[in-house]
Image: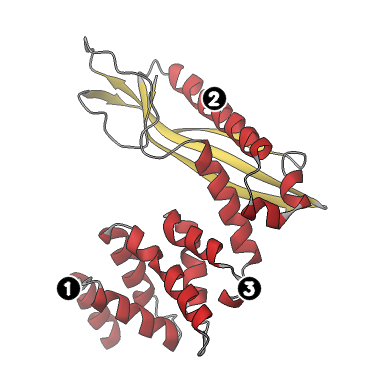
Amino acid sequence: MIVTSTNTIEGREVLRYFDPISATAVIGANALSEIGASFVDFFGGRSRNYENKLQELYKSVVESLKQNARSYRADAVIGFSVNIDEISGKGTQMFMITAIGTPVLLHPSTHIQAEAVGGDIDGSVIKNKVKASLIIERYTSIYAMDNTTAEFIATSRLTEFVPLLFKAMNDDPGLAQEYIDRQAVLFRYFDFLNKDQVTAILYGHLLSNDLTSKQFKYINKAISSSNLIDYDQVEKLLVGSLL
């Protein structure tokens, strides 16, 4: 069965769309023991045992999603994505992994396409989302962040980091070149998103009317330097300012 993160399958016609489905799995305390034992080791080195556990968990949740899709007699699952939610309490920490997709019935074809997961969705996405959750939980300021973590955030394309980025806009690097460079690396995050995503994020926060002066200044600079002027959004801002 084809499983893809895209909403279409090249060369195949969709005859019917079914209701979205999901499958869930949980990483228990034992699976997280390596992280708890050494946070630095998790970020600084590669833990093969931990990565293998995440790959196994990923395969399990995808297989459950496919079994669910087969109950509809579907040929493929499109719009595949993976979400990570943290569950903590009573001294334990777990991560719930949810795979989501839409089963579809495809037009019969003499060409048999190999099973694939489109885009960059694989077990590494789960690892990155867990890592992102830990970074967000422990974030205090750019002063406590190393350059490797800043680079990971910038290139991740994970929307979970948007609130952290807006917090970092309020950090003042002062005259220390180390912190100036780190903040610059961090804000490259927007360079790795597509134009529509960046426009929606920046203008969405402008329209919220809940910005500090530093955030407002950075957003205006980003819109101007990246040529992201959207006149429909500007009109909304003008109308809002007159109300």
Q: Is residue 4 above or below residue 72?
A: below
The amino acid type found where label 2 is placed reads: Ser
Task: Determine the residue positioned at 44% across, 80% down.
Answer: 210
Residue situated in front as seen by the camera: 208 or 48: 48
Q: Position of residue 223 (x, y in %)?
A: 27, 75
Upstream in the sequence, badge 3 or badge 1? 3
Residue farthest toward the top in the current orientation of the protein: 110
Task: Determine the residue positioned at 76% across, 51% down.
Answer: 36
| Residue carrying label 2 | 64
Q: Under tag 1, what secondary structure? A: helix
Left or right, 86 with reference to 100: right
- Count the marks: 3
Residue situated in front as seen by the camera: 29 or 39: 39
Left or right, 42 with reference to 36: left
The amino acid type found where label 1 is placed reads: Tyr
- Would you identify the image quadrant in which residue 8 lies? top left
Residue farthest toward the left in the current orientation of the protein: 231
Upstream in the sequence, badge 1 or badge 2? 2
> CB atoms at circles 1 and 2 under 8 Å apart?
no
Q: Position of residue 162 (x, y in %)?
A: 46, 65
- The residues tagged by marks 2 and 3 sit, at their Cα atoms, a distance apart of 40 Å
| Residue carrying label 3 | 144
Residue situated in front as seen by the camera: 16 or 84: 84
| Residue carrying label 1 | 231
Mark 2 residue crowding within 10 angstroms, few (<14) / some (14–19) / many (20+): some
